[in-house]
Image (spheres, helix red, strand yellow):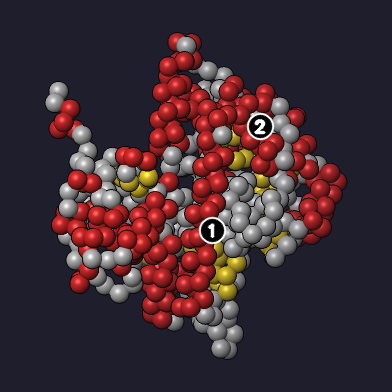
Amino acid sequence: MDRAKHTPPDWSEHAGADFLQLDPAHAPPGGLSHWIAESVRTAIGDGRLPLGSRLPPGRRLAAELGVARGTVTEAYRRLAEDGHVARRGRAGTVVVAAPATAPAPPPPDTGHAPADPFTGAPGPGVFDALRAAPARIDLTPGVPDLAAFPRAAWLRAERAVLAQASPALLGYGDPRGAAPLRAAAAAWLARNRGIRADPGRVVVVAGTAQALGLVAHVLAAERVGEVAVEDPGSLGVRQHLAHWGMATPPVPVDADGVRVEALHATGARAVLLTPAHQYPTGAVLAPHRRRALIDWARGTGGLAVEDDYDAEHRYDRPPVPALRAMLPDHVFYTGSVSKLLAPALRLGWALAPERHHGALVEAKRFADLGSAVLPQLVLARLMESGELERHLRLLRRRHRRRRDALIAALAERLPRARVHGAAAGLHLTVTFPGGPDGPAFDDTALARAALREGAKVHPLSWHRVRTGEPGLVLGYAATPAGRMDEAADMLARALARAG
């Protein structure tokens, strides 16, 4: 095979300005650095700059464009921050990932118009419909920075795992998961979440979604037919629990988290909580509420299902210990790497109270005989080597810049909006207070208007059982900081249209 035909082009030896068709005279408003970065992103997205390509040196490109070298340096810095390029020493600046905002291939022509995700009550397919909807900017909550996936580190770990794996590892494994990942996950939980767990008690699952199904199975076997949920709280979680036959009575949430006295009133024997960073409000379960919850669990024999979905991502506050660390005998704990690495990995872990551990393992065994082993071993190696910790530190810096840019853009373009939950996580919630001088609109109509402007968002009402202030839930992890002004402009236009 002629290897030269498959080697990525070395554009560092070409006239970068000519190849990218850059002409500063035609640069739109917004700054030359932003324009250069967007031009390179476009070239990466349409294939002119494939993975592995070297960009022109900054000094040369600046000379060709007749701009300051610092302008090109800033453009390259933005591209590196977004995970599209990386500095490789003497090898120069190399393309390492396609932009997350690259246009998706058109869906197959079925003869039907695309489903409107904002028509009627949100059903089981609403998230699929929203994902399939075309948009220039994706502010969907729960979408991580997929362009930042550590491909090189994953590939190195995968090669090492395959080089060392014995044939026996390719057979049927332990339904609890591969021993190296259970040990690495236990150590990770101890360092990052304050949870002391025996690796033998960790159960590897296909993400939090599977964990919820397994827990629902365990609870149903004990004739528990309802799991109280936070209100507002995740629509997706309610849908999963309902699919597995659980009723989901709502419990109000305020600035201190779930209202435990209202939980008592439901009579439910189990409750699902997001105590470290409540979804979608961002509230942290306050100490007095934690004590009240502990009293509820011990006094009634109640069980809490702790969804620790993005607790590692924090910016302006110290870490909050997991509820499981305080109440191990009454908490099912679930976590995953979906927000840290990628949802496509389908990897996470669950811990059950001691008396329910065997039932959880049995449910996992009959669900799928155990999760795929090779990805588990690769993840374990990343955790043991410190690569995952380094990746988390990179993400925190990047997400903080994106969050700050979004908050600043919202303050300028939507000054009446109130921002909630900014101290941690990967999303913000904005509400629009009602009243004689406030907006009067359906936030679902606002989300539809935003989609027509080119931005995907969630209406807050999707995540409510009871009515409340209109609002939007905005994910910021997947959108570069340089595009937040554009995103806020879209939302401002949508608000004017909806209002």
Percent of width and height locating residue 257 = 70, 59
Residue 153 visible within the image: yes
Residue 232 visible within the image: no
Which residue is label 2 attached to?
187
Kind of residue sitting beneath label 2: Ala
Q: Which is in the foreground here, disc 1 or disc 2?
A: 1
Q: CA distance from mark 1 to mark 2?
A: 26 Å
Which residue is pictured at 21% across the width and 42% down the height?
A: 10
Question: SS of the residue at dot 2?
Answer: helix
Q: Nearer the viewer, residue 430 or 294?
A: 430
Q: Is residue 395 left or right of residue 326?
A: left
Which residue is label 1 attached to?
400
Percent of width and height locating residue 157 = 46, 27
Q: Residues within 10 Å of mark 2 (few under 14, many from 20)?
A: many
> Where is the N terminus found, in terms of image quarters?
top left
Percent of width and height locating residue 357 = 69, 28
Q: Residues within 10 Å of mark 1 (few under 14, many from 20)?
A: many
Q: Nearer the viewer, residue 339 or 327?
A: 339
Q: Nearer the viewer, residue 198 or 395?
A: 395
First in residue order: circle 1 vs circle 2: 2
Question: SS of the residue at dot 1?
Answer: helix
Which residue is pictured at 79% across the width and 56% down the height?
A: 287
Which residue is pictured at 51% across the width and 49% down the height?
A: 395
Q: Is residue 456 left or right of residue 215?
A: left
Q: Is residue 48 left or right of residue 96?
A: left
Percent of width and height locating residue 58 = 30, 54
Q: Is residue 159 above or below residue 63?
A: above
> Where is the C terminus found, in terms of image quarters?
bottom left
Which residue is pictured at 41% across the width and 81% down the height?
A: 496
As drawn, which residue projects farthest toward the top?
Answer: 167
Kind of residue sitting beneath label 1: Arg
Q: Where on the picture, by quarter, is residue 452?
A: bottom left
